[in-house]
Amino acid sequence: MIQPALFDYSPRVYTVSEINSYLRRKFEVDPHLQEVWLQGEISNWRPAASGHIYFTLKDALATIRCVIWRSTAQQLLYRPQRDGEAILARGHISIYEAGGNYQFYVEDLEPAGQGALYAEFERIKARLAAEGLFDPALKQPLPLFPHRIGVVTSPTAAAWRDILNVLRRRFPLAEVILSPTQVQGETAPLQIVAALTRLLNQPVEVIIIARGGGSLEDLWAFNDERVARAIAACPIPTVVGVGHETDFTIADFVADVRAPTPSAAAELVSPDSSDLRQQVSELQTALVEASQQQLDRSRRDLQQQSWALARLSPQTRINNHRQQIDLLASRATRAQQHQLTLRRQQVEHLAARLATLNPDSTLSRGYAIVQKDQTVISQTGQVADGDLIVVRVSDGRFEAIVQPSSSRS
């Protein structure tokens, strides 16, 4: 312990650790700091991997850092669910020597009702819900392949870098337009509304409104009623990615789509180019196969139709009729020749008979034809003495008078 030297007025130089140790012992011997109940709102509730819990307890004028050791945290009957809750905490106050900070070491927690910020959050939420701003029927669908994506966030925030990284990886074809704004503080709500309004004059097809995680106070700009109404009235589809997965703001409820993080918001508005390439490749293969199958079917149909047309074609019947005509003509020619031969033979036969029966032939052999009154005389009794007869011989005829003959008597 630091002991003042008697009658020694020369200054003594102490180390930082000596002062912090001295102050820690002062805190620990003060009975007013050993069994303390504090009331305030929780902020920055942060469980560590070690099992310890770190947070801040605050009221309207001041804050104090708080620690719950793992052994104590495992025995707590009550655990706050969100920042902004009002609690009663029992513990003692001491100095963290390494950092020179005084802290409240919590040994027990009790709920003390909702904090003012969370109560205001619930009031705004209930009022806007009653007005219908959260109605699912008002939600706009997100475009499948946006060419231009607007982003409302701080240009220096990690959320902006995360969004760019995701969009460049998934869909580098899209143009990203940043409308910068503060995302924390008293002036942030009006700046967010102005940044959103600026994007309405740009040819964007979807808008991301984002910021990283933080306490309820850090995210309070996105619970502002002016921001909520601007998002609800936005004619362009909006995606809000504010904080972490467990963080909810009024902006989440009025947006068309809520994303758990800024990176998730970027994934929601962008198709994965690798998936698109795979889909295009599969569609191309399917199209080639379908086209080949259709071509094969068309070829078979064409061949069958050609065969059917050939069977039904009038040209085939014409060719058949031509062949029949040629056959019939050939038959007719042979029949005519046969008939002609027969007729020629008949004529020759008749001519021979005619020649045989021709009186001229008989006359040429020395015979004569005797006529009386143009009647052929074949018997002597047909004439009388003195009758005038006509005798026809081979080279002419002459007249004669019948005279008595001894043979006739």
Image (tube, rainbow, N blue to C red):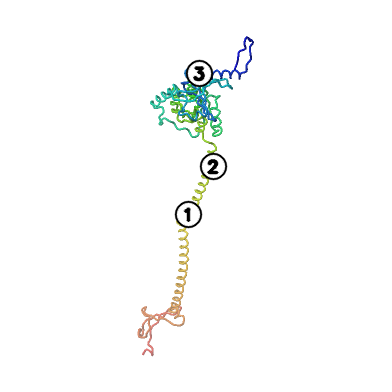
The kind of secondary structure element at disc 1 is: helix
Callout 1 touching callout 2 (CB < 8 Å): no
Give the percent coordinates (x, y) of residue 196: 48, 24
Residue occupied by mark 1: 304
Q: Nearer the viewer, mark 2 or mark 3?
A: 3
Query: With respect to residue 123, does 273 lie above or below?
Result: below
User: For residue 175, what is the image quadrant?
Assistant: top right
Tell me the tag on residue 281: 2
Residue shown at the point (48%, 17%) measured from the top left: 61
**How far is disc 1 from disc 2 in space, using C-alphas?**
35 Å
**How far is disc 1 from disc 3 in space, using C-alphas?**
107 Å
Query: With respect to residue 208, does 286 lie above or below?
Result: below
Task: Give 371 or 212, whichever is nearer the viewer.
Answer: 212
Of the image marks 1 and 2, the number of the one nearer the N terminus: 2
Q: Tell me if I can see residue 81 in this picture.
A: no
Give the percent coordinates (x, y) of residue 6: 62, 10
Q: Nearer the viewer, mark 1 or mark 2?
A: 2
Q: Tell me if I can see residue 292 in this picture.
A: yes
Tell me the tag on residue 26: none
Query: With respect to residue 57, does 298 lie above or below?
Result: below
Give the percent coordinates (x, y) of residue 167: 54, 32
Residue occupied by mark 3: 31
Callout 1 touching callout 3 (CB < 8 Å): no
